[in-house]
């Protein structure tokens, strides 16, 4: 019977896609009919977050179920440790055919075949929107064409020619990572859309940490290079236009599964590896703990485990994906993972033990010297952020406290408000307790030097 077969897995990961860049999430001009179909036939997580908002640490957390300080990938230049448990490794041991196709980006210069995958197609670093050189099962070759379509076609070929075993496919997109180059049919898709700067674009005053203003003209500031685009409007339009091709890709994968008869026995997981600030808080980047940086799209579809469409509001993390996949596939769990399976949530059940808060961390990177160390805690209503120097001296930058229920755009920093001091003290205490529970106290991090102005190297942008 179909219901007793092990479920297949298709995990689709985009790069730098914000939580609100979905039609179904109410975006004012971006239409994503194929992603909306997934959400309307499955579960959409309205409060999904990453715990370190940069590509490589987040990707390692998706695979391993671990925080960055646990898996060790704390920047974009560290390889995924070869002996680290991951859900693809566990599914391969359970008899699955496994494939990774597309952007890997853990280890900037290393595109070698990784453990856990029978079929491997990836590349060094960021890849290119056009004509990327891929490592195809150990053989490098440049494949002509637009990246999103290239990796989609590779995935479709693999699905068509796979064997009879259950399968797990990871499909990694470059989009919507900068520098944004839409495919020709979409390059003018939003020319007639009025682009406005967000309400927090000008928040650089004394109630905000001073690094926001210090970096405003840098690679990560709203008045900076804008990834080489001629103006803010073009930059925002092109970012969104690349997502249209991703939506087409999702539709092609969905249709292929449907035509093969595997759609309703395949767990489809769609996620972004982190969010992205499109001018909010005068910033063009991720890394920080503001909502646009840490909040991601996350959708799952499988009619056996998700009997009716549902929107979930619980605090769900990127590292929850690994235990969820292994649980639904009845595979061996990763014993060291502090994350949780979403199985009960997907079934529409109340999980009284589900988390009410989570820990966030980011370590200063000398290659991108525009964001200090970040530590913080987010609850269902509140967020506390601080910027430790790394040497136990008093923080150089002002901390932040937000009441997200009444201030979802984080426009009013309450940290110096007398009426909020008790809440700030409570959250500092809770943050310390979370760090102790997760084994990251005493905390270690790089020293925060003064932020710099120069552009990063071309090869790592």
Image (tube, helix red, strand yellow):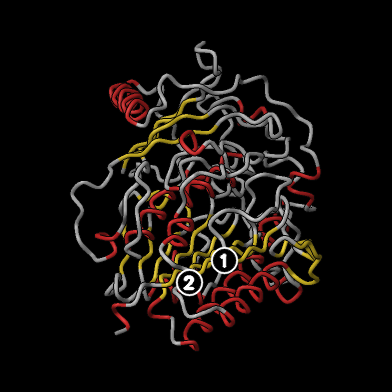
Q: Which residue is mark 2?
A: 167
The reply, left or right, for residue 422 in relation to residue 435 is left
Q: Quadrant of residue 281?
A: top right
User: Measured along the vertical axis of the image, is residue 202 above or below residue 119?
Assistant: above
The crowding category of the residue bearing disc 2, from other C-alpha atoms within 10 Å (few below 14, some 14 to 19, many at least 20), is many
Q: Quadrant of residue 370?
A: top right
Q: Residue at x 32, y 49 (%)?
A: 340
Give how far across and how far down residue 267 sits, in percent.
41, 70
User: Measured along the vertical axis of the image, is residue 103 above or below residue 147?
Assistant: above
Give how far across and how far down residue 437 sits, in percent.
32, 29
Among the two numbered marks 2 and 1 on one chain, the one whose residue lies closer to the N terminus: 1
Give how far across and how far down residue 130 sits, in percent.
78, 65
The reply, left or right, for residue 43 in relation to residue 12 is left
Q: Which mark is residue 99?
A: 1
The crowding category of the residue bearing disc 1, from other C-alpha atoms within 10 Å (few below 14, some 14 to 19, many at least 20), is many
Describe the element under mark 2 as helix, strand or loop: strand
């Amino acid at each position: 019977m179909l219901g007793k077969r092990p479920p297949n897995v298709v995990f689709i990961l985009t790069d730098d896609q914000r939580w609100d860049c979905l039609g179904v999430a109410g975006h004012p001009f971006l239409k994503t009919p194929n992603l909306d179909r997934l959400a309307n036939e499955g579960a959409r997580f309205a409060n999904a977050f990453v715990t370190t908002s940069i590509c490589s640490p987040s990707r390692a957390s998706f695979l391993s179920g671990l925080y960055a300080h646990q898996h060790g990938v704390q920047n974009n230049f560290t390889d995924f440790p070869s002996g680290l448990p991951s859900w693809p490794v566990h599914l391969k041991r359970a008899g699955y055919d496994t494939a990774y196709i597309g952007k890997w980006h853990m280890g900037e210069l290393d595109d070698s075949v990784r453990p856990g995958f029978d079929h491997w197609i990836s590349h060094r670093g960021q890849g290119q929107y056009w004509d990327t050189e891929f490592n195809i099962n150990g053989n490098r070759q440049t494949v002509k064409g637009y990246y999103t379509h290239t990796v989609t076609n590779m995935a479709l070929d693999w699905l068509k020619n796979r064997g009879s075993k259950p399968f797990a496919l990871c499909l990694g997109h470059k989009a919507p990572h900068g520098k944004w180059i839409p495919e020709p049919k979409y390059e003018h898709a939003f020319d007639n859309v009025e682009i406005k700067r967000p309400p927090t674009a000008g928040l650089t005053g004394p109630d905000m940490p001073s690094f926001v203003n210090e970096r405003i003209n840098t690679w990560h500031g709203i008045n900076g290079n804008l990834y080489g685009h001629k103006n803010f409007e073009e930059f925002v339009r092109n970012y969104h236009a690349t997502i249209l091709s991703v939506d087409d890709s999702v539709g092609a994968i969905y249709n292929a599964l449907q035509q093969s008869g595997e759609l309703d026995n395949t767990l489809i997981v769609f996620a972004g590896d982190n969010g992205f600030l499109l001018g909010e808080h005068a910033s063009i980047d991720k890394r920080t703990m503001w909502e646009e940086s840490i909040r991601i799209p996350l959708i799952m579809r499988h009619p056996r485990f998700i009997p009716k469409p549902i929107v979930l509001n619980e605090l769900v993390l990127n590292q929850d994906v690994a235990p969820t996949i292994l649980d639904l596939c009845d595979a061996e769990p990763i014993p060291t993972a502090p994350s949780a399976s979403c199985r009960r949530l997907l079934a529409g059940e109340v999980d009284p033990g589900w988390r009410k808060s989570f820990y966030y961390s980011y370590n200063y990177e000398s290659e991108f010297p525009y964001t200090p160390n970040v530590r913080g805690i987010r609850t269902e209503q509140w967020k506390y952020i601080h910027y430790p120097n790394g040497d136990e001296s008093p923080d150089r930058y002002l901390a932040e406290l937000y009441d997200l229920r009444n201030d979802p755009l984080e426009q009013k920093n309450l940290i110096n408000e007398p009426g909020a001091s008790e809440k700030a003290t409570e959250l500092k205490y809770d943050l310390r307790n979370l760090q102790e529970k997760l084994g990251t106290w005493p905390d270690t991090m790089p020293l925060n030097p003064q932020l710099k102005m120069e552009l990063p190297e071309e090869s790592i942008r």
